[in-house]
Each structure stands twice: as C-alpha cells, then as structure tokens.
Amino acid sequence: MDKPEKLRFSMLDALIAAGVLAAALLAVWFFYFRGSGGEDVWVEYTFEARGMPLSYEGVPIVGGRVYDSVRGDFLGVVVDAYYRPAKLFTEDVVNQRFREEAVPDQLDVFIVIRAEAVETADNIRIAGDSFEIRVGTHMFVKGKGYAAEGYCVALSTSPRGD
Amino acid sequence: MRRPEHKPEGGLKMLDERGKLFGKLNIIDALVILLLVGLVAAVGYRFTASGMTRTADARVRYTLMIEGVRDFTLEYYQIGLRCHDERKHEYIGDIVGVRSEPFIIPLPLSDGTVVMSERPGLLRIFVDIEADARETASSILINGVYDLKVGSKVKLNTKFIDVEGVISAAEMIY
C-alpha cells in the first residue's frame, strides 16, 4: 500500500497564508471593532422636512419607529412631532430686501427622534454604530405611513446609564 | 548514458509551455507576490505619510467660512471640537475660534442694479482651526497628507456638525 504523500509548504504558500490571515483579521477589525469605544448615551435629534403637504400633519405618531429609507437602519423612536406653515425666502425688490414668507398649503415638519447612541470626541453614532448623526446631516427617513427627505437641525445627548 | 537536456529553441523563454516565468516561477505565484508587495507598499506609504505629523515642526491656523448657516445652529460650533474632512477622511485640526456675522448677499433689482441685503435667519460663520503642519516649498500639509489651500472646499465634520465651507485664510504659526 502506498504511503500518503507528505504535505509540503513552500515559502510562497506561507506568504499567501499570511496574506489571507492578515486580510481576515483586517475584515474582523473593520466590521466589529472599528470606531468602537465611546460612551453610551441617548441622543435626541430633530429631523426637519420642508415644504410637505398639509396631509402630513399627524402622520408621524409619538412612539413610532423611524428607519433610514435607503439602508433600512433603525434611527430611533418618535418622541415629538410639530408643524409650522412652510417658509420661503423671497426677493422684495421694491423694498430692496429679502423676506421670509409663509407658503400656502405647505408645512415644515419637525420630527424629534430619540435613539441609543455611542458618543466619542469625533462623532455620535446610532443604528448600531453604522450611522453618524450631526446637525446638517442629510437624511432620508421613513416611518409607518410616511417618508421624507430632510436634515437634522438640532441634537442633544444625555447619559444612558443602563 | 546521460541524455542531453532539452532546451527550448532560441534560449530561455520568458514564459514556458508550463506557464512558468523563466522556467522557475509560476505566473499565478508571481502575481500573488506582486499583489502582496503592492499591499505592503500601500500600507507602508499610508502609515509613513500619516506619521509625518510626528515630525511636524509648525502649526497652521486657518479659517473656514461657512455661508448661509441657519442662526439657531450656531450653538453647535464650539471651541475645542475636533475637525475632520468628510470627503478625505482626514483629521484637520481643532476649533480655536468661532465668529459670525449677518448673511448679507447681493440682491438684483428690477432696474438692473444690485444692492446688498441681509437674508433673515441666516449667518455667515468663520471657524478658526489650528493643526500641526509641515510646510514644504509647494504646500502646507496637515497630518502629513492633507494639502491645505485657501479657496478649497471642505466638508467639515465635528462631533455635532456636518457642513460645507471654504478655506478663506491660512497662516503658519511657529
């Protein structure tokens, strides 16, 4: 009976194995440890959508869950929603000034959202660390029965302590 | 009797019939080695370049002008916050000063003339940022790699804000 052939590793095999191992470690670090660290906090932020139809009033309900409508990330729970007549800058050439005027039949919608977050010196991350929220962040959100595009216009954090 | 070795006609071929370079190294192996060397070189360059800040012998103070900022967001521009360029993923210094003024811009009139007028509710904000830097004959490098140029656009990220501005001034401070 023939003896099984002995396995031999060349220098090149070792190099390839080292390369694959390094790539695997890098992938693990990238997906599980990158940007980790920081303090667990609650973040409460205000999402603003401008020029929405009047029928929008009352659709985002307190307690409703909010998601990113592009990636599907969970962005938090609605804690407040308020509305005002939509406003638009106009050019008043007679009086030589800009004016801010209400737009008939349109609303500016403000949805206050609360989410678990991790706060560091560089960012505040929500949605399981995958979404960095800042004042000025362009957002596409959806909830039960509505969707909107807008910006984060205010935020604050508080200790989570759980 | 020893048989004469078969040699390809015309001497050593670069790639022989078994796919080996110069009769020794498999072409796939050669490609893998090239890829690994390239990766090591890229990582080495990245870390060496980033490491230049350790030898930075100067600091730069520059101003980022941000126009048309809504007035109620001014509170989020805070001294001490760390700044990053979102597009280049680079740390670009810490905020050392914040100033604001009314957002006054040209308003064309119906007779073709132009007057300067204030946009209510909006501000022009100047954010002063300081960073370690290295000055060369042709550039000012923050963090070893970030080329600072007056007039260039920056997508500024701090912990609290995400906004685009233009670098309006820069000076070396030693």
Image (spheres, coloured by chain):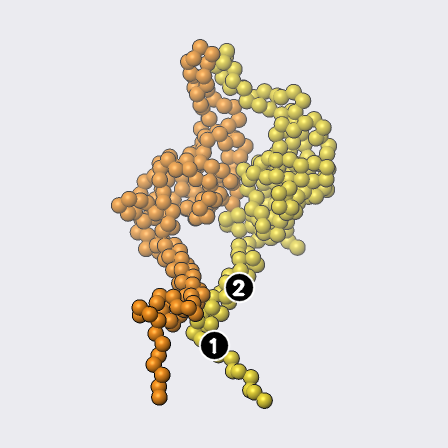
Where is residue A131? Give x, y as percent: 58, 47
Labels 1 and 2: the sequence-earlier one: 1
- Judge by depth and name the residue closer to the eye, A156 or A110: A110
- Looking at the picture, does residue A120 appear above or below residue B16? above
Q: Place residue B33 in its image quadrant.
A: bottom left
**Chain at tag 1:** A
Q: Which mark is residue A9?
A: 1
Where is residue B94? Give x, y as percent: 43, 45
Q: Place residue B26 in its image quadrant.
A: bottom left
The residue drawn where x is 39% and y is 68% is B16
Chain displayed in orange = B
Q: In the image, what residue type sits under mark 1?
A: Phe
The residue drawn where x is 32% and y is 40% is B171
What residue would you read off at disc 2? A24
Where is residue B129? Give x, y as percent: 40, 42
Q: Is residue A4 left or right of residue B125?
A: right
> What is the distance, in whole Å, between disc 1 and disc 2 at their CAs?
21 Å
Q: Is residue B33 left or right of residue A160?
A: left
Residue B44 visible in image: no
The residue drawn where x is 53% and y is 48% is A123
Image quadrant where one finds the N terminus of chain B: bottom left
Q: How many marks?
A: 2
**Chain at tag 2:** A
Q: Place residue A134 in its image quadrant.
A: top right
- Looking at the picture, does residue A106 appear above or below residue A37? above
Q: Residues within 10 Å of mark 2 (few under 14, many from 20)?
A: few
The residue drawn where x is 68% and y is 27% is A53
Q: Which mark is residue B126?
A: none
- Looking at the picture, does residue B99 appear above or below residue A123? above
Chain A colour in the picture: yellow
